[in-house]
């Protein structure tokens, strides 16, 4: 069982709060999107309002990447968004960092430096070894409790995620709590229950399809995007060399795995009936009987949209992971927009994180019951996988 903020009296305590605010940056190194910061406001506001002394731990980017930077912009934005005063320290477990935590007054917040500036945090450890890292051992003496609100990183086993619960009383923040409640309860969600699987991460989507069908918790899988193209190829449809190349570049085993699923669960897997390609600079829709096409399939067509929308109109639960096409281009955002909007009419509608949530924001689609903050972590939960950070909280 995971303890939550309801089980913690934080008044006067120094609380180490792990969040996931890994965000896109603009050319000046400023935040280009603060959606991930906004997700954690409830947790930080609650802790500060209850007189906790909050030390925020987070990462930004990966070493060598263009978005690998300090957390000064994040601290500035938190200071604008929160009623509580927010400071920034350019160290994580240095003497200055420990002094910054120790000098906090009740209701104050300090954002410590990017945890990934230290090599330990970019490695995977078992919890016992993670607890013995410099990051954990240097910070534990100035902390009284640990709260993990970073669901988006919960599938990783890094010191800031799994080490602190070995040394301190540990709790889930409000983001983590909501994610576990919703995603952990999908097996009991209203039926019929449809999983709309698309995007370009074919292996991940096939893992989800295999898991939910094997466990009999899906009444149907609706395949779109590159995932849908893999299923069409497995079903013997001649998509064309361009589409086949994209599928095989994503996964050389995708077509074989999709074929195995069709052999076992063909009646529950709904394939695209038509696709949209680009011809002479315009969107052109082709029925599967009219293929192959010289150019790649970039979206599903009107027949597919109508068929999938009809299923989703009667859905008790709709779970979406991955867009239906190249939604970044307006001409090929039609399938994603209309299928996603149909899903909002389900009694319970859940959106996986990552590219799926990005598509929602770009297209301005609202009305879902729950939009996950985590791509990889959400996928792991949908495939009934274990989340190391959650296991650490349970211990």
Image (cartoon, rainbow, N blue to C red):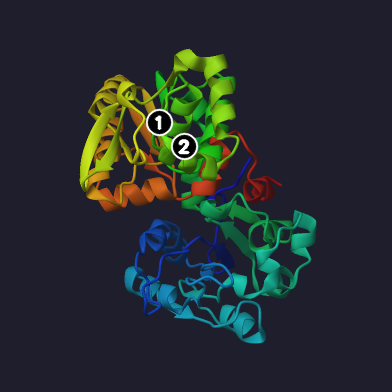
Q: CA distance from mark 2 to mark 1?
A: 7 Å
Residue 366 in sight: no
Under tag 1, what secondary structure? loop
- Where the N terminus falls, by quadrant? top right
Q: Residue 10 shows which numbered tag?
A: none
Q: Up-down: is 77 above or below 256?
A: below
Residue closer to the observer: 192 or 204: 204
Q: Nearer the viewer, residue 205 or 289?
A: 289
Q: Is residue 162 left or right of residue 196?
A: right
Residue found 56% across the figure and 49% down from its top:
7
> Looking at the rendering, which quadrant does residue 145 occupy?
bottom right
Q: Are marks 2 and 1 in contact (CB under 8 Å)?
A: yes
Q: Nearest the camera: 149 or 265? A: 265
Dot 2 falls on a residue whose secondary structure is: helix
Mark 2: few/some/many CA within 10 Å (<14, 14-19, 20+): some
Instruction: Tell me the residue at 38%/29% (across/down).
Output: 318
Question: Where is mark 2, residue-wise?
Answer: 244
Res 356 seen here: yes
Coordinates of residue 153 in the picture (x, y in percent): 56, 54
* Residue for badge 1: 239
290 lies left or right of 196: left
List x then y, in percent, for residue 22.
Answer: 48, 64
**As displayed, is residue 155 above or below residue 345?**
below
Q: Residue at x 61, y 77 (%)?
A: 92
Q: Nearer the viewer, residue 213 or 349?
A: 213
Q: Quick one: label 1, few (<14), some, or many (20+) residues within 10 Å?
A: many
Looking at the image, how many numbered discs can be counted on the residues?
2
């Amino acid at each position: 069982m995971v303890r939550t903020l309801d089980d913690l009296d934080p008044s006067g305590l120094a609380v180490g709060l792990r969040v996931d605010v890994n965000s896109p940056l603009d050319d000046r190194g400023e935040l280009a999107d603060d959606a991930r910061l906004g997700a954690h406001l409830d947790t930080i506001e609650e802790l500060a309002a209850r007189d906790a002394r909050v030390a925020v731990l987070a990462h930004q980017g990966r070493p060598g990447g263009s978005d690998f930077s300090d957390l000064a912009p994040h601290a500035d934005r938190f200071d604008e968004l929160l009623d509580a005063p927010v400071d920034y320290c350019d160290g994580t477990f240095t003497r200055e960092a420990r002094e910054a935590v120790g000098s906090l007054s009740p209701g104050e917040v300090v954002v410590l430096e990017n945890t990934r500036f230290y090599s330990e945090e970019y490695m995977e450890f078992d919890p016992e070894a993670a607890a013995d890292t410099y990051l954990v051992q240097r910070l534990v003496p100035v902390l009284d409790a640990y709260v993990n609100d970073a669901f988006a990183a919960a599938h990783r086993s890094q010191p800031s995620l799994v080490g602190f619960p070995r040394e301190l009383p540990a709790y889930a923040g409000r983001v983590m709590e909501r994610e576990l409640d919703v995603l952990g309860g999908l097996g009991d969600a209203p039926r019929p229950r449809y999983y709309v699987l698309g995007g370009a991460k074919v292996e991940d989507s096939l893992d989800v399809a295999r898991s939910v069908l094997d466990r009999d918790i899906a009444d149907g899988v609706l395949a779109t995007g590159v995932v849908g193209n893999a299923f069409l190829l497995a079903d013997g449809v001649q998509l064309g060399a361009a589409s086949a190349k994209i599928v095989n570049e994503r996964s050389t085993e995708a077509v074989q795995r999709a074929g195995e699923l069709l052999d076992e669960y063909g009646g529950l897997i709904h394939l695209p009936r038509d696709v949209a390609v680009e011809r002479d600079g315009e969107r052109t829709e082709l029925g599967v009987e009219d293929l192959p096409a010289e150019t790649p399939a970039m979206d599903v067509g009107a027949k597919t949209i109508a068929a999938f929308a009809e299923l989703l109109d009667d859905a008790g639960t709709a779970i979406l992971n991955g867009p239906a096409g190249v939604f970044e281009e307006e001409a090929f955002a039609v399938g994603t927009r209309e299928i996603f909007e149909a899903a909002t009419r389900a009694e319970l509608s859940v959106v996986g994180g990552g590219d799926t949530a990005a598509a929602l924001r770009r297209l301005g689609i609202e009305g879902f019951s729950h939009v996950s903050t985590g791509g990889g972590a959400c996928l792991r939960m949908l495939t009934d996988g274990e989340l190391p950070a959650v296991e650490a909280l349970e211990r």
